Image (tube, rainbow, N blue to C red):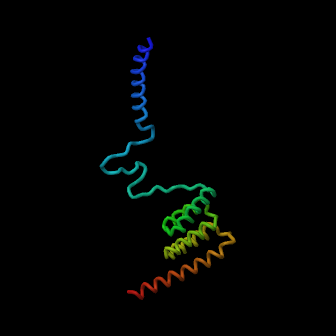
Amino acid sequence: METMRRKAVFPLLMICAAVCASVYSQPGPGTQRPRTGGPVLIKDFEEPGEKAEKVYPHDPVAARKNLEIGEYYMKRKNYAAAVDRFSEAIEYDKTWPESYKKLIKAYDKKKEYMSAVEACLKFAENNPDSGQLKHFRKEEEKYRKKQEKLEKKEASRN
């Protein structure tokens, strides 16, 4: 009797295992299987050459996190990644001067002085009543002068 039950249960277990395996191996709703070969299609809601703009809610916690990650990249001398993170921190909290200061420093390390000037102007635009405005005006002037020196140096080489 015991062996008959075992013989009857084993095929049922095998059928259940096969059904479960086929169900779990299929992608769930909202997921796609990776494509093999062929061109990658552009999403339906984007026009070719048009980039969808991300909307950033005011989130000081996300700003702080991006700032910390940017500082990590600065220590590693990965200034391009630091610029991206500091810029994202600014998007999350446009009133936080520390993000702008770090962004300006990263641009300075990359010798992108006009980008540093633009960051100063962006701070002034977003925070016209800030007590830090005088500091950013001085920084703007400093980086304009650095840009002029750089341009003169490049002109003398040619």
Residue at x 60%, y 70% (from the top left corner): 101
Residue at x 45%, y 14% (from the top left corner): 2
Residue 70 figure quarter: bottom right
- Residue 80 appears at what percent x and percent y? 48, 67
- Residue 60 appears at what percent x and percent y? 63, 58
From the image, which quarter does the C terminus lie in? bottom left
Residue at x 43%, y 84% (from the top left corner): 154
Whether residue 41 is situated above or below residue 67 in the rendered picture: above
- Residue 64 appears at what percent x and percent y? 61, 60
In this rendered view, identify the residue nearer to me: 97 or 54: 97
Whether residue 157 is situated above or below residue 94 in the rendered picture: below
Residue farthest along the right direction in this orientation: 131
From the image, which quarter does the N terminus lie in? top left
Residue at x 41%, y 21% (from the top left corner): 10
On screen, residue 107 versus residue 93, left or right, reads left
- Residue 97 appears at what percent x and percent y? 63, 68
On screen, residue 81 versus residue 12, left or right, reads right
In this rendered view, identify the residue nearer to me: 48 or 110: 110
In this rendered view, identify the residue nearer to me: 122 or 2: 2
